[in-house]
Image: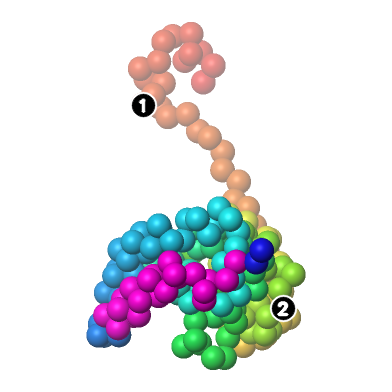
Amino acid sequence: PTYSAVHDHHYRAWNYKLKADLSRLNQIPSKMERNEVKRLSVPEYDEYIQPLLVSGQTGKNNDVFAWVLVWCVDAGLLDQAMKMLAVALVNELTPPRLFTSRKLPEIVVEDLSAMVIEHQTPEMFKDYLLKLEDLTKETSFPDYIRAKLYRALGQAMMKQSAPDAAEWFEKSFEYNPKVGAKALLKKCRKLMDAPVRKTTRRRSRDTLKHAPDDAKQYD
């Protein structure tokens, strides 16, 4: 039988807690402080969330699961976010009622991409972004959201591989030229075109001064 969260008495109890937590968050003006409260609150829902991850069934309407997923992204709990998103996609889970213009996968992809784009060290999110892209490759998004994901992927790979980063920036620009990938693509191409400096290793005279005689004779 299909799981129905709405008719589950456990769901009703957790939904009551959720409403109290949302009310508390609404009283906190600082985004950083709200995200810290979310980080601390997520484990409190494990008793409800973990069995759903094991069963793979959330029901199509489950505000508790949906909100905790959004909180995981906001708080940087990305291992759990990826697991929850995979289950949410299978169940076609609807977004929390507060979100009226975006579907749940769109919220996750856009918010995580925006976080990476603004981060000082985007390369630390590379594996999460690749996982996110793989999970959502069959999901249809507005072009600007897909473009943000591809820009974030490019930034995450820029230090490691300029050619790989350039490919993601090109895809981003194709989907939407207004998300900032063009300038980054130019920067990548400059890195790719830059000549590689050849350095020759010179043995130090100080080192040879203290080297054994049989080493000095080859200098």
Q: In x, y percent, where is residue 99?
A: 50, 87
Q: Which mark is residue 206?
A: 1
Residue appearing at x 30%, y 63% in the figure: 40
Asked whether residue 14 appears in the rendered view, the answer is yes
Q: What span is in magenta?
A: 3-24
Q: Residue at x 35, y 76 (%)?
A: 16
55 w.r.t. 19: above or below: above
Q: Quadrant of the N terminus?
A: bottom right
Q: Which of the two discs, 2 and 1, labels the residue nearer the N terminus?
A: 2
The answer, for residue 150, to whether it is visible in the render is: no
Residue 140 has which mark?
2
Q: Could you say which quadrant of the image residue 82 lies in? A: bottom right
**Residue 211, percent across and down?**
40, 15
What amino acid does circle 2 point to? Ser
Closer to the camera in the image, 208 or 64: 64
| Magenta stretch holds residue 124 | no
Image side of residue 210 versus residue 52, left or right: left
* Image depth: mark 2 or mark 1 in front: 2
Amino acid on which the number 1 mark rests in the picture: Asp
| Residue at x-position 72% and y-position 78% | 140
Secondary structure of the residue carrying numbered label 1: helix
Please tell me which residue lies in front, 147 or 131: 131
Q: Callout 1: few (<14), some (14-19), or many (20+) C-alpha neighbours within 10 Å?
A: few
Q: Nearer the viewer, residue 46 or 112?
A: 46
Q: Residue at x 51, y 20 (%)?
A: 219
Specify whether residue 5 is painted magenta. Answer: yes
Residue 94 on image: x %, y %: 58, 79
Q: Are marks 2 and 1 in contact (CB under 8 Å)?
A: no
